[in-house]
Amino acid sequence: MAEAKKNTRTVVETEFALKLSTEEAETLTAVLVKISGSLVDSPRQHTDSILKGLQKAGARDWESNGHPYWLLDKSQHGVYFNNYGTEPRKANGFNGIRF
């Protein structure tokens, strides 16, 4: 005779809600644009997701005139994420951050 067993599993997912003013959202957008790394195999995929969410919610595009992005020091390269499971890059004596 056949036997069957029902397995029930509960998945817990934690989410965060962040309430930002327009100025705060635009500042965060400016910072997120300066982050680089793999969109597939590094934390950059998460920063890109946040950026897209802000844009979808109506935050002004970072290329717009007067956006806080244009106040960033362009001589600085930004933040670089290494891929998961790899050794951090060494640049200027720092691990994982290139300035």
Image (tube, rainbow, N blue to C red):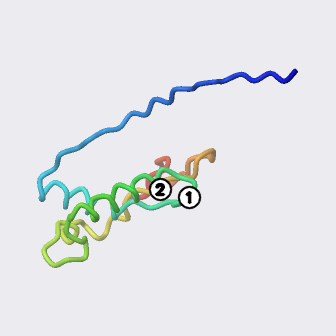
Residue at the extreme right: 1
Circle 2 sits on which residue? 45
Residue at the extreme bottom: 65
Say which quadrant the C terminus sits in: bottom left
Count of numbered marks: 2
Q: How crowded is mark 1: few (under 14 residues within 10 Å), some or many (20 or more)?
A: few
> At 31% across and 39% down in the image, what residue appears?
16
Image position, residue 3 (x, y; %): 80, 21
Image position, residue 68 (x, y; %): 17, 66
Q: How crowded is mark 2: few (under 14 residues within 10 Å), some or many (20 or more)?
A: some
Reply above or below: 54 against 95.
Answer: below
Reply above or below: 2 against 67.
Answer: above
Residue in the foreground of this view, choosing between 60 and 89? 60
* Residue 70 picture quarter: bottom left
Per the rendering, the mark at residue 21 is: none
> Mark 1 or mark 2: which comes first in sequence?
1
Q: Is mark 2 on a helix, strand or loop?
A: helix
Residue at the extreme front: 1
Image-based side of 80 in relation to 76, left or right:
right
Image position, residue 77 (x, y; %): 38, 65
> At 25% across and 76% down in the image, what residue appears?
63
Q: Which amino acid does label 1 sit on?
A: Val
> At 46% across and 55% down in the image, what residue appears?
44
> At 39% across and 33% down in the image, what residue appears?
14
Residue in the foreground of this view, choosing between 53 and 92? 53
Image-based side of 46 in relation to 25, left or right:
right
Q: What residue type is labelled 2?
A: Gln
